[in-house]
Image (cartoon, rainbow, N blue to C red):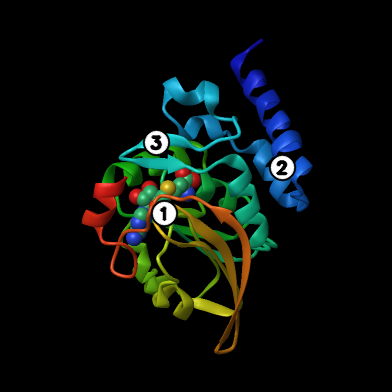
């Protein structure tokens, strides 16, 4: 069997077993998980495991999230198609590619230079021209393009960074893991004027968010 057919079948299995069976219902999310080639976002010697039910290393002590977590966080954002999205923590660029297939515009920010370069490369090879990958500290948000209808943070925050709340539109959703370095609660925040409601969704484990409104980098290096 040729490789692209093999990967397509792996994606179909992933969506049935890891997503539909666990309650992901948003058809837009399921469709995009079927179409984005996750194997292109990991190193060639990791591709065999790209559709496994697990996170994978992407170098620099960072990981691409488990496919189910990507689907769950995307569903929680309630995207309809016309949103401007900020993602903090580009990593491999996979989550950004998933978002770009549903939203109007995606700004994704990353602090590690090599990951920025690699993510830009894959995203451009896939022809996703509505994504911009920027090398900045995402705990400060990205004020120049604010406000955002949707903000997603794919690294673990000790608390919700204030700039991200400020840069959220009225009615907007902010999805992020909040807690300690070893384990966090996935939370969805919703803005209503000056009020913010928080729903606690599920326990998760992400790599740390490092920056002015996150963890200090020396602390995270010693643990991770
Ligand atoms: N969404 C990614 C996985 C992210 S892993 C994917 O689909 O592959 C978390 C990423 O957040 C890491 O690459 C890490 O370097 C990055 N990160 C941590 N703190 C950050 C910060 N303050 N600003 C931007 N990126 C940050």
Residue 149: give x, y in percent of width and height: 58, 71
Residue 160: give x, y in percent of width and height: 45, 71
Of callouts 2 and 3, which one flags the residue occurring earlier in the amino acid sequence? 2
Residue occupied by mark 2? 19
Give the quadrant of the C terminus.
top left
For marks 2 and 1, give the one nearer the viewer: 2
Of callouts 1 and 3, which one flags the residue occurring earlier in the amino acid sequence? 3
100 sits to left or right of 19:
left
Secondary element type, mark 1: loop
Residue occupied by mark 1? 89
Q: Residue at x 59, y 41 (%)?
A: 67
Secondary element type, mark 2: helix
Of callouts 2 and 1, which one flags the residue occurring earlier in the amino acid sequence? 2
Residue occupied by mark 3? 58
Q: Are marks 2 and 1 in contact (CB under 8 Å)?
A: no
Report whether residue 28 is seen: yes
């Amino acid at each position: 069997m040729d490789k692209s057919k093999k990967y397509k079948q792996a994606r179909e299995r992933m969506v049935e077993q890891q997503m539909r069976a666990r309650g992901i219902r948003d058809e837009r999310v399921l469709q995009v998980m079927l179409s984005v080639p996750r194997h292109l976002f990991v190193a060639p010697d990791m591709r065999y495991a790209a559709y496994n039910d697990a996170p994978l290393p992407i170098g620099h002590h960072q990981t691409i999230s488990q496919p189910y977590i990507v689907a769950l966080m995307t569903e929680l954002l309630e995207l309809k198609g016309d949103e401007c999205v900020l993602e903090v923590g580009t990593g491999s660029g996979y989550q950004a590619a998933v978002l770009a297939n549903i939203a109007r515009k995606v700004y994704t920010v990353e602090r590690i230079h090599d990951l920025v370069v690699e993510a830009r490369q894959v995203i451009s090879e896939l022809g996703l021209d509505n994504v911009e990958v920027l090398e900045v500290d995402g705990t400060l948000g990205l004020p120049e393009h604010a406000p955002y209808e949707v903000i997603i943070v794919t690294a673990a925050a000790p608390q919700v960074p204030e700039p991200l709340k400020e840069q959220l539109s009225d009615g907007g959703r902010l999805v992020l893991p909040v807690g300690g370095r070893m384990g966090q609660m996935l939370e969805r925040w919703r803005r209503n004027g000056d009020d913010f409601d928080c729903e606690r969704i599920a326990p998760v484990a992400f790599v740390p968010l490092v920056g002015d409104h996150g963890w200090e980098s020396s602390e995270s290096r010693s643990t991770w």
